[in-house]
């Protein structure tokens, strides 16, 4: 994968500081066309909130009050449906050959390392960036390879892009492949929400150990 240069549009409510943080992250991660794993990670000064692999957001995101469709065909409101205090949010697609697989695998492995009591407080949500190919059945089977408790969501591309834009995730158009298929460019960060808002982001390549530490810390901070 060759990362693309454009950075995602940051919601107008973001402060200059958060904009700077996101620009740094996007520069390091790029947009995942999902043809290779980014090898760059954020490894600057220690995060002020104590995260080992994550970057805390000075101006947290609000979870979009928007309903998409889960793998059972029911409406799932991102702001009101989650029943656990911590939500991990990731945008990707099931035909992604490597980056999405790596991120979801790392999250699944990290969750296994988290204390069971803390793990029960965490919900992972996957939102497809390719609703034309990713129906409910396809997403459910795909997520079952990593963790059957992961929640998968789909909807119209317009709705998905609207939700993504409000949490700093960019979704590009399709790039045709010689095989006749296509890639979907998208930002590949995982966003961690506590009971109030999105507090921290992790880029691809963050170690499983750091993810496990940070997930536990986010649970503590959500109490």
Image: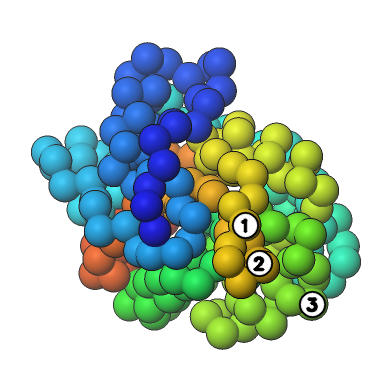
Q: Is residue 130 left or right of residue 205?
A: right
At which x and y percent is residue 29? 34, 47
At which x and y percent is residue 132? 79, 59
Label at residue 181: 2
At which x and y percent is residue 210? 24, 62
Mark 1 vs mark 3: which is more N-terminal? 3
Q: Is mark 2 on a helix, strand or loop?
A: loop
* Image quarter in which the N terminus is found: bottom left
Marks 2 and 1 close (CB-CB < 8 Å): yes
Residue pointed to by mark 1: 176
Residue 123: tell me if it is visible.
no
Q: How far apart are marks 2 and 1 (CA)?
A: 6 Å
Mark 2 vs mark 1: which is more N-terminal? 1
Q: In this view, does 21 lie above or below 37?
A: above
Q: In this view, does 10 lie to the left or right of 21?
A: right
Q: Which residue in the rendered view is the most extreme toward the left? A: 45
Answer with the quarter of the image where residue 109 lies.
bottom left
Label at residue 64: none
Q: How far apart are marks 3 and 2 (CA)?
A: 20 Å
Q: Residue at x 37, y 15 (%)?
A: 16
Marks 3 and 2 close (CB-CB < 8 Å): no
* Disc 1 residue crowd, few under 14, some 14–19, many 20+, Cα 10 Å: few
Residue 6: tell me if it is visible.
yes
Marks 1 and 3 close (CB-CB < 8 Å): no
Q: Is mark 1 on a helix, strand or loop?
A: strand
Q: Is mark 3 on a helix, strand or loop?
A: helix
Q: Which residue is drawn at 59% across and 42% down?
A: 172
At which x and y percent is residue 26? 37, 38
Q: Nearer the viewer, mark 1 or mark 3?
A: 1
Residue pointed to by mark 3: 137
Q: In this view, does 164 lie above or below 93?
A: above
């Amino acid at each position: 994968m060759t990362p693309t240069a454009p950075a995602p549009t940051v919601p107008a409510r973001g402060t200059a500081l958060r904009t700077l943080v996101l620009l740094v992250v996007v520069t390091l991660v790029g947009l995942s066309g999902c043809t290779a794993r980014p090898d760059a990670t954020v490894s600057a000064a220690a995060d002020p909130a104590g995260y080992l692999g994550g970057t805390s957001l000075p101006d947290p995101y609000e979870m979009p009050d928007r309903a998409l469709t889960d793998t059972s065909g029911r409406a799932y409101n991102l702001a009101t449906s989650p029943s656990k205090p911590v939500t991990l949010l990731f945008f990707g697609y099931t035909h992604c050959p490597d980056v999405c697989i790596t991120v979801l695998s790392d999250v699944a492995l990290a969750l296994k390392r988290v204390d069971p009591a803390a793990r029960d407080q965490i919900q992972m949500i996957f939102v497809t960036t390719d609703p034309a190919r990713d129906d409910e059945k396809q997403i459910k089977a795909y997520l079952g390879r990593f963790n059957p408790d992961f929640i998968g969501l789909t909807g119209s591309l317009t709705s998905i892009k609207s939700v993504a834009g409000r949490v700093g995730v960019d979704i590009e158009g399709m790039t045709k492949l010689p095989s006749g298929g296509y890639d979907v460019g998208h930002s590949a960060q995982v966003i961690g929400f506590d009971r109030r808002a999105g507090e921290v982001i992790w880029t691809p390549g963050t170690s499983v150990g750091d993810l496990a530490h940070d997930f536990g810390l986010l649970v503590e901070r959500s109490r």
